[in-house]
Amino acid sequence: MFRPARMHQDRSTMINLHLDMNPWSYIEDQDNSTQIKILSSLKYTFDSHWITENNEPGCATIGELNVQGLVNLADNLEEDGGFWLVPGFHKYLPQWTQEHGSLRARYGKHQRFILLDRADIPELYSVACHISTRAGSAILWDQRTLHGSRANSSLRPRYAQFFKMFPRQHPAMTPEREQYRSQAIRRKLQNENINSETDLTPLGKNLFGLI
């Protein structure tokens, strides 16, 4: 939830553009061995493990499709701030990484969340587009797309649920990891009094990796 900030500027969400991945390792790595090593070791005992899962899209050589998204749970108007992105950025990510060697030196190849200031990329901040949507609408984007949030300057709160989608059949989804992952999801559902056997549709169970 992003609180309304017109009357309380201290609540204002930081305006940002970022990548949930490291673009330099994505372009330079020759295989997905690092991704497979990191993902196959996840046990989902900490919430940070879900962030780790989200931020490992592999490498350009393999070219996996990783889709991020959100569902707006309330109408999100222009003045409410919210999600924005740089249209088509994923198409010239290789060129951008080559042209920004100074940023590579700053972030290295191992940081998996790249938060970029306006001063670093003013030309991209100037072309970023806010996506206004109605409640229940989903927005999907290629993970390689530069995206982020704009500040809420209205009297309405912003509600959204973020998610990521990737193929279930994946070399890093070992039987052990799949078991740890499903157990963690069941625990989280139980904490919200949701019975994974009776309260989810077959599609819901499949999307959560429970069947």
Image: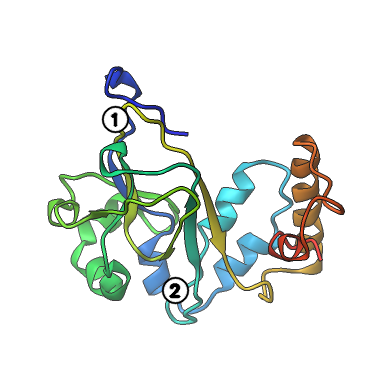
Tell me the tag on residue 34.
Answer: none
Local secondary structure at mark 2: loop
**Within-10-Å neighbours for mark 2: few <14, some 14–19, many 20+:** some
Whether pointer 1 and pointer 2 mark residues with C-beta atoms closer than 8 Å, the reply is no
The residue positioned 50% from the left and 52% from the top of the image is 136
The residue to which callout 1 is attached is 154
Local secondary structure at mark 1: loop
User: As drawn, which residue projects farthest toward the right?
Assistant: 197
Give percent across and percent down for residue 12. Answer: 31, 27
Quadrant housing the C terminus: bottom right
Relative to the observer, which residue lies in front, 103 or 64?
64
Relative to the observer, which residue lies in front, 118 or 185?
185
Give percent across and percent down for residue 170. Answer: 66, 75
The residue positioned 29% from the left and 30% from the top of the image is 154
Closer mark to the observer between disc 1 and disc 2:
1
The quarter of the picture where residue 203 lies is bottom right
Residue 100 placement, left or right of 68: left
Label whose residue precedes the other's in the sequence (1 or 2): 2
Asked if 35 appears above or below 64 in the picture, the reply is: above
The quarter of the picture where residue 47 lies is top right
Give percent across and percent down for residue 173. Answer: 71, 68
The three-letter amino acid code for the residue at tag 1 is Ser
Asked if 54 appears above or below 67 in the picture, the reply is: above
The residue positioned 37% from the left and 52% from the top of the image is 133
Relative to the observer, which residue lies in front, 138 or 164?
138
The quarter of the picture where residue 158 lies is top left
**Within-10-Å neighbours for mark 1: few <14, some 14–19, many 20+:** some
The residue to which callout 2 is attached is 29
Q: CA distance from mark 1 to mark 2?
A: 43 Å
